[in-house]
Image: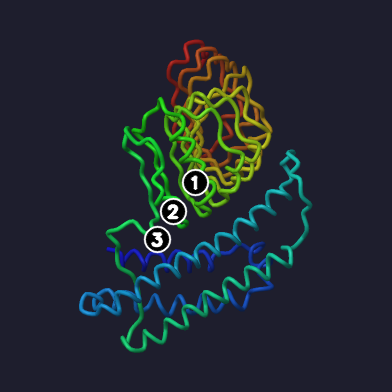
């Protein structure tokens, strides 16, 4: 139900605030009071959400208040995510194992302009919640949200599945709050519609969390792909016309799942070292050897799949750096002849699957 969903959002935002790391808490010093007030207000609202769910069917004004509350919750989550992304950026810049040089200077604190901006945004959210509290008093509880049956500016999820679609509907260009975009069963012969969709994503959907472009005929990702700093799930499986990654790809520092099975990359770019939040990775490499440097930065990686790596002869010896790895899949690597000794140091490894690797000597 939408109302129970709101309760979950409130819990999620509260958890993000409560579990700020030591470094994040230090960086939030300049707007700590606003953050603390937001936490207190959200806790108060959460306590009455289930009561609101029971009463909203008999009270139209309560239903409208729930609409407002949903948007405020999403805005609050976006602000917290903005802050965590900036903190993560600073962590990447100061990471001892990253050799890729990002073109900006790191400092020991957030820029004052950014701190003031964050403080102002949180203060505005607190004001909106306080204004809504006046309505809550009339209901003797709190608020939440309902559900819309028309496409409006609050749409969060888009799925393109019409193989006759020739262009992006104009109404979609008005949306700004989309969180997930799935592209499937579109005509793979028309590159134009795929380019229109990806350009729509990078220009309008600032807080996009998931983007699936399986088997797209795209030949390249736009240079603005790096603006999707909240993106956590990117699926490029089967996009065989893409030869290299965008120069701004390293900015996708929030990525946790990355599927590039079928993209014939000659080698992973050094900029991939910046993706230190990766948990799941599928790749196709056309080189004989995989560089070891990026392994040192992927301490959270739990799944690694190497698919159709026709020329790959060996894995890097630095596999021991993947301390969280649980599953390693090797498929269609006909020239792979051996596994590195460093695999024995992967104490969390649960599954090692090897298929269609005829030359491997175990």
Residue that numbered label 1 is attached to: 201
| Quadrant of image for the N terminus | bottom left
Q: Say which label, 3 or 1, has the lower sequence index.
A: 3
Corner quadrant of residue 221: top right
| Relative to 101, 198 lies left or right | left
| Mark 1 element type | helix
| Mark 3 element type | loop
Q: Say which label, 2 or 3, has the lower sequence index.
A: 3
Residue that numbered label 3 is attached to: 154
Residue at 47% of width from left, 39% of height from top? Answer: 196
Find out whether the residues at labels 2 and 1 contact each other: C-beta distance under 8 Å. Answer: yes
Residue at 25% of width from left, 76% of height from top? Answer: 56
- Categorize mark 3 by other alpha carbons within 10 Å: few (<14), some (14-19), many (20+): some
Determine the CA span between mark 2 and mark 1: 9 Å
Q: Nearer the viewer, residue 145 or 279?
A: 145
* Residue 203 locus on image (x, y percent): 54, 48
Determine the CA span between mark 3 and mark 1: 15 Å
Find out whether the residues at labels 2 and 3 contact each other: C-beta distance under 8 Å. Answer: no
| Relative to 303, 189 lies left or right | left
Residue at 36% of width from left, 84% of height from top? Answer: 136
Residue at 54% of width from left, 12% of height from top? Answer: 335
């Amino acid at each position: 139900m939408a109302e129970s969903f709101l309760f979950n959002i409130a819990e999620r935002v509260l958890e993000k605030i409560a579990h700020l790391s030591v470094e994040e808490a230090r960086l939030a010093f300049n707007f700590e009071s606003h953050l603390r007030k937001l936490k207190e207000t959200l806790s108060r609202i959460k306590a009455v959400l289930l009561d609101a769910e029971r009463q909203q069917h008999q009270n139209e004004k309560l239903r409208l208040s729930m609409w407002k509350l949903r948007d405020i919750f999403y805005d609050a989550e976006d602000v917290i995510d903005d802050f965590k992304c900036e903190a993560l950026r600073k962590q990447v810049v100061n990471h001892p194992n990253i050799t890729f040089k990002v073109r900006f200077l790191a400092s020991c604190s957030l820029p004052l302009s950014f701190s003031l901006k964050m403080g102002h945004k949180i203060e505005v959210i607190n004001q909106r919640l306080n204004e809504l509290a006046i309505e809550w008093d009339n209901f003797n509880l709190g608020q939440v949200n309902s559900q819309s049956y028309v496409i409006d500016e609050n749409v969060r999820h888009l799925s393109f599945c019409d193989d006759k679609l020739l262009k992006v509907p104009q109404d979609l260009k008005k949306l700004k709050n989309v969180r997930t975009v799935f592209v499937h069963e579109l005509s793979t012969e028309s590159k134009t519609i795929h380019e229109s969709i990806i350009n729509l994503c990078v220009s309008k959907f600032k807080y996009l969390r998931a983007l699936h472009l399986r088997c797209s005929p795209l030949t390249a990702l736009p240079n603005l792909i790096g603006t999707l700093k909240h993106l956590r799930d990117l699926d490029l499986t089967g996009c065989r016309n893409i030869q290299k990654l965008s120069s701004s790809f390293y900015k996708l520092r929030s990525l946790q799942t990355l599927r590039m099975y079928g993209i014939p990359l000659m080698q992973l770019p050094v900029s991939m070292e910046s993706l230190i939040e990766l948990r799941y990775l599928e790749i196709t490499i056309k080189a004989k050897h995989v560089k070891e440097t990026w392994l040192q930065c992927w301490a959270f990686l739990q799944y690694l799949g190497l698919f159709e790596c026709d020329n790959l002869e060996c894995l890097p010896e630095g596999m021991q750096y993947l301390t969280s790895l649980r599953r390693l899949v090797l498929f269609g690597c006909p020239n792979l002849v051996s596994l590195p000794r460093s695999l024995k140091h992967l104490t969390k490894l649960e599954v090692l699957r090897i298929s269609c690797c005829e030359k491997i000597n175990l």
